[in-house]
Image (tube, helix red, strand yellow):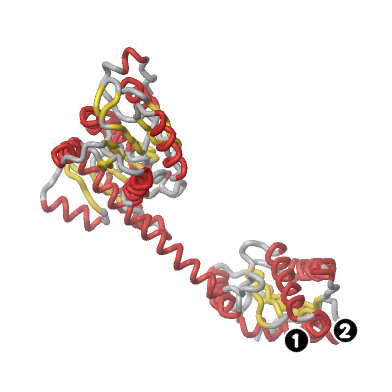
Amino acid sequence: MSHPPNKSQASRQPFTGRRQTDSKKALLIENSPLYHKFLSEQFSLMGYKPVIASSRQDALEQLHSNSFQILCMNMYFEGGNAIDLVKEIRCHDPGLVVIMLTSDKSRRLRNHALRAGVTEVIYKAGRKDISRQISRCLKHNKHSRLLGSKVMYVEDSLTQAAANMRTLESMGLEVTHYRTAEAAMASIQQMNFDLVITDVLLKGEATGLTLLRHIRSLPGSEKRIPVLTLTGYDDAARRQELFRAGTSDYIAKPVLKEELVIRVTNLIGNKLLADKVAGQQAQLYDMAVRDHLTSCYNRRGFSELAIICIKQVEAKPDNMSFLLLDLDHFKNINDSYGHDVGDQVLSAVGGLLISECRSDDLVARYGGEEFVVLLPRCRKKAAMKIARRLREKVEDLKPVGVHITTSIGVTRAPKTCKPDLDKMFKTADQALYAAKNQGRNRVSFHRYPES
């Protein structure tokens, strides 16, 4: 990493791209102290850290030593003008958002600025109008959505890697570079990448196609990571081979900066949108399968997940235990204190069960004051120990000052037979009935029928 140039160097050296990816920053080049203050406030409100430069020399020094996502500058400033500076910047930093402020409303100047590489020309009218236009520009800028996205870049040529990484980092991306497909395959599941960029021909035995096929064979969401393939062969047969292997897109060498920016922006943008949709779907599903009062699974959610849990146990036979809990004399609580207090009691008990059980145990409110717990890989002795601890914890809970107790029925499905959810429930219910008959506030076990 090169050091920031001193002031005498900054006026002579060409801009060579940003050196590191920091938090969101905006570089402001403006001579007027009033506009300095106004623009700093505006970008701060939008989540950017404003950095002030009063001249071309100061601006180049900042651009050499820091990472910026936004450059906002007046048309003219000490030592230069916006159009000449943006031409110099665009050669090395196509991803930077450049906003030019001017009082000149001529179409000729506007077109000249846009051709030079300015993202948006904003006229100096009222401050509210300037604020609105800046906000609109950032809202519709695609690169602002990509900030912090993680990219795996696989390239054995250090020269090519350095050039393309400058472009990627100028877009605000976090880039991890690997020189071989073997190293990339070993790391692909250790980090949550948003995009993989790989050359086809690499050092080592594995190629970019090997990496691509490996990614597409991964379990879960990792196999859907977008992959951008770089290739020196742009014939139809090679393109068909890449798409059959599962590439999302490709670029023929030599890589053009503008093309790389566009394709990377589209691929990561689509991936982030798909992640958002998947997250919303997961949230909706969680709302559908959980009891809103206790945060435990409801009967539907428990039934669906228990089937999956049982199938996992079938693949590797082991003991599975089942607990059925019923709060003692709960009707009296509702009658004496009201249903609002009863709801707070149920909520507290549900939270206790979730916190006391293991992460792979299934805890559900089965109905009314009845809860169930499915315990995979749990023998009778361990299940009884858990049930006794839960009984003691419930008795010590005293939610909203109300003394409560619970009776618990326990059963265990041995690994010698296939667990059956209905049979486990009925057997645990028999054990619970015995606990009630013995005086409540106790744990009872009933043997699971193996026939």
Residue 263 horizontal/vertical position (percent): 25, 48
For the C terminus, which image quadrant? bottom right
Mark 2 lies on residue = 438
- What secondary structure is marked by label 1? helix
- Circles 2, 1 touching at the beta carbon (< 8 Å): no
Kindly identify which residue carries mark 1.
430
* Amino acid at the residue labelled 2: Gln
Q: Nearer the viewer, residue 101 or 151?
A: 101
Amino acid at circle 1 = Gln
Residue 147: assigned label:
none
Q: Quadrant of residue 7?
A: top left
Q: Is residue 328 visible?
A: no
Q: Please, is residue 257 above or below residue 379 in the view?
A: above
Q: Secondary structure at mark 2?
A: loop
The answer to which of marks 2 and 1 sits earlier in the sequence is 1
Label 2 Cα crowd, 10 Å radius (few <14 / some 14-19 / many 20+): few
Q: Residue at x 33, y 35 (%)?
A: 71
Q: Is residue 58 left or right of residue 353?
A: left
